[in-house]
Amino acid sequence: MHVITVCMGSSCFSRGNAHNAECIKRYIVETGQEVALSGCLCRNECKNGPNIIVDEKVISHVSPEILPDLLDQVLENR
């Protein structure tokens, strides 16, 4: 099972990770992926935010526009 952690530190949150979290939830439902989704506080990558962590790999500059393709790629759903 994959693990996705969404940074909810103030910088990532204000840059859109609240919306990204909703997009990830929708993606999981639509694709039926087995994914554990959680949130975390700051990981000191603020300048590159918004950030998510997929299976311990930090992914920066995440936006709703790139999320579906990004998740397909990292979760190998192609």
Image (tube, rainbow, N blue to C red):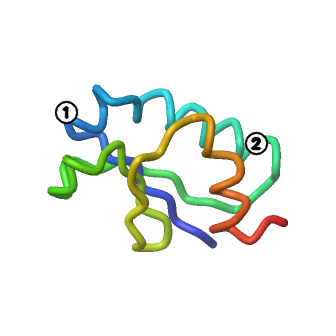
Residue wearing tag 2: 29
For the residue pair 54 and 47, the one nearer the viewer reads as 47
**Rendered image: mark on residue 10:** 1
In percent of the image, x 43 and y 60: which residue is there?
59
Asked whether, in this view, residue 51 is left or right of residue 45, the answer is right
Q: Position of residue 42 (x, y in %)?
A: 18, 49
**Rendered image: mark on residue 77:** none
Whether label 1 touches label 2, CB < 8 Å: no
For the residue pair 77 and 36, the one nearer the viewer reads as 77
In percent of the image, x 70 and y 62: which residue is there?
34
Separation (CA) of disc 1 from disc 2: 27 Å
Label 2: which secondary element: helix
In percent of the image, x 31 and y 45: which residue is there?
49
Please determine whether, in this image, residue 75 is positioned above or below residue 69: below
Quadrant in which the N terminus appears: bottom right
- Report the number of numbered marks: 2
Quadrant in which the C terminus appears: bottom right
Q: Position of residue 5 (x, y in %)?
A: 42, 55
Q: Amino acid at mark 2?
A: Val
Task: Please tell me whether mark 1 or mark 2 is closer to you in this view.
Answer: 1
For the residue pair 25 and 47, the one nearer the viewer reads as 47
Q: Amino acid at mark 1?
A: Ser
Please determine whether, in this image, residue 64 is positioned above or below residue 55: above
Q: Residues within 10 Å of mark 2 (few under 14, many from 20)?
A: few
Asked whether, in this view, residue 67 is left or right of residue 18, the answer is right
In percent of the image, x 39 and y 54: which residue is there?
60
Q: Position of residue 27 (x, y in %)?
A: 71, 43
For the residue pair 33 and 52, the one nearer the viewer reads as 52
